[in-house]
Image (cartoon, rainbow, N blue to C red):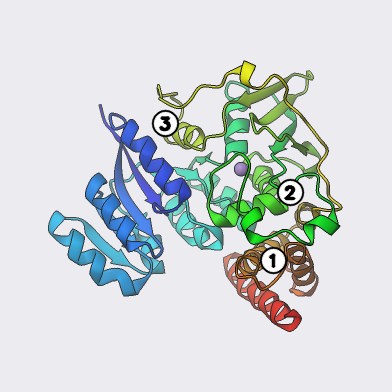
């Protein structure tokens, strides 16, 4: 049997390492063709020795020599730098590209992979947030499929199996509510970085964990869902479901709601995207209904968790506004993690940038880059003025 050759962009992060666990368990189905890391050269070397890819990329050029010295004799090609990420996905011998980069950095490599007609397993939601319209158009023009890895979007995708002819009435994205669910502004004022980094259900990287605590993650996922599934804003609903057992739902025009359920474990959506349309037998822990005699649902709190409202506003405004929102949020999260601003200030900072940055109704790729640069700069200046 031909094994599917997978390129993993961002192999040392949370999604990347879990993807390698999936590939290891399913070694009869998959092999690794490319691994890339931002700065974690030690882990990249260890992964490359174990999975023997054709090529690796270390984005941090200062680590190039160290990686090359370890891997050259094994016949593994070693490249360095941001541009190498865009070039490596054009190589032959790649059947699918898993984009597990964090933030805006995922955009250009994803475009490059689509242009070279590689199917995408999309874990980098920011790519869809920033440039969903352009990416989906480009994918259609190149006949490239994009398989969602984000658990909510994977759930929706799974619910849509066998339903391609049936119009969707709406989708219902579930949100855990994060560690601060139910808190009001007075309490949110005082929450610490350590508390924000402790998600009740999911094991994830730092950026997305903070986004989950602030509900920005759900906002980004609303925008991601709009483009992945070609929906109107009114067709996307968010509901808080603290147990994270229902990963999301689709309602059809006959009133039927389909839900995809399971224990919260990113390895399932990763494996589903890599193996689609197959469901591979796995060792993942099974869900037992009796462990969860009740599942709960609540309205999201847009007053106290303003980031979700800001994301809806950005989606309504369209153009480059989601790109502005994303850039401001990336800077705000970094500043919060760096103890420069408090938890609630993240929303103030993002809102300020959304008001001040230049709006472009129909952005092209250069406009996205300019918007991203400008929004980051504006956000930094605002944070520095405040502190
Ligand atoms: Mn998600």
Looking at marks 3 and 1 on the same chain, the residue that comes earlier in the sequence is marked by 3
Does residue 232 sit above or below 348 in this rendering? above
Residue marked by disc 2: 180
Please provide percent x and percent y for residue 96. 39, 43
Q: Percent from the top left, x then y, of residue 167?
A: 71, 27
Residue at horizontal 41 percent and vertical 63 percent from the top: 38
Compared to 154, does 287 lie above or below?
above
Which circle's residue, 3 or 2, is located before the other in the chain? 2
Q: Residue at left 63%, top 42%? A: 200
Q: Tell whether 351 sits left or right of 374.
A: right
Residue ID for mark 3: 275
Q: Position of residue 238 (x, y in %)?
A: 76, 39
Crowd class of label 2 (few under 14; some 14 to 19; many from 20; radius 10 Å) = many
First reached walking from the N terminus: tag 2 or tag 1: 2
Disc 3 to disc 1, C-alpha distance:
34 Å
Depth check, front residue: 148 or 269: 269
Give percent across and percent down for residue 6: 35, 43
Asked whether mark 3 and ligand 1 are closer than 8 Å, the reply comes as no
> SS class of the residue under badge 2?
loop
Quadrant including the C terminus: bottom right
In this view of the protein, which residue sits in the foreground, 367 or 121?
Answer: 121
Ligand 1 quadrant in view? top right
The local crowd at label 3, few if under 14, some if 14 to 19, many if 20 or more residues have their Cα within 10 Å, is some
Tell me the CA gap for discs 3 and 2: 35 Å
* Label 1 C-beta lies within 8 Å of the nearest ligand 1 atom: no
- Residue 360, visible in the rendered structure: yes
Q: Viewed as shown, does residue 345 lie left or right of 326?
A: right
- Disc 1 target residue: 324
């Amino acid at each position: 049997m031909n094994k599917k050759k997978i390129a993993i962009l961002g192999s040392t992060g949370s999604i990347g390492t879990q993807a390698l666990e999936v590939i290891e368990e399913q070694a009869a189905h998959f092999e690794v063709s490319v691994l890339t890391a931002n700065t974690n050269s030690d882990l990249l070397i260890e992964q490359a020795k174990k999975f023997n890819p054709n090529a690796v990329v270390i984005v941090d050029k200062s680590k190039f020599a160290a990686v090359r010295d370890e891997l050259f004799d094994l016949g593994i090609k070693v490249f360095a730098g941001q541009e190498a990420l865009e070039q490596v996905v054009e190589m032959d011998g790649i059947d699918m590209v898993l984009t597990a980069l964090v933030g805006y950095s995922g955009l250009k490599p994803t475009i490059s992979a689509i242009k070279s007609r590689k199917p995408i397993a999309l874990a980098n939601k920011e790519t869809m947030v920033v440039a969903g319209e352009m990416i989906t158009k480009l994918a259609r023009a190149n006949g490239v499929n994009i398989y969602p890895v984000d658990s909510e979007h994977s759930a929706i995708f799974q619910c849509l199996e066998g339903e391609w002819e049936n119009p969707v009435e709406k989708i219902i994205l579930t949100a855990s509510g994060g560690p601060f669910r139910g808190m009001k502004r007075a309490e949110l004022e005082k929450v610490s970085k350590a508390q924000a980094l402790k998600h009740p259900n999911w094991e994830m990287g730092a950026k997305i964990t903070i986004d989950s605590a602030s509900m920005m993650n759900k906002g980004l996922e609303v925008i991601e869902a709009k483009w992945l599934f070609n929906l109107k804003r009114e067709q996307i609903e968010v509901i808080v479901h603290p147990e994270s057992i229902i990963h999301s739902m689709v309602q059809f025009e006959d009133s039927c709601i389909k839900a995809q359920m399971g224990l919260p474990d990113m390895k399932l959506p990763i494996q589903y995207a890599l193996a689609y349309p197959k469901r591979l037998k796995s060792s993942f822990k099974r869900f037992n209904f009796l462990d969860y005699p009740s599942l709960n649902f609540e309205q999201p709190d847009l007053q106290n968790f303003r980031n979700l409202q800001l994301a809806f506003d950005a989606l309504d405004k369209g153009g480059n506004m989601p790109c502005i929102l994303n850039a401001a949020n990336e800077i705000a999260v970094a500043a919060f993690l760096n103890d420069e601003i408090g938890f609630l200030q993240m929303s103030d900072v993002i809102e300020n940038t959304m008001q001040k940055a230049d709006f472009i109704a129909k952005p092209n790729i250069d406009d996205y880059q300019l918007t991203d640069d400008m929004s980051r700069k504006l956000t930094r200046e605002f944070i520095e003025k405040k502190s």
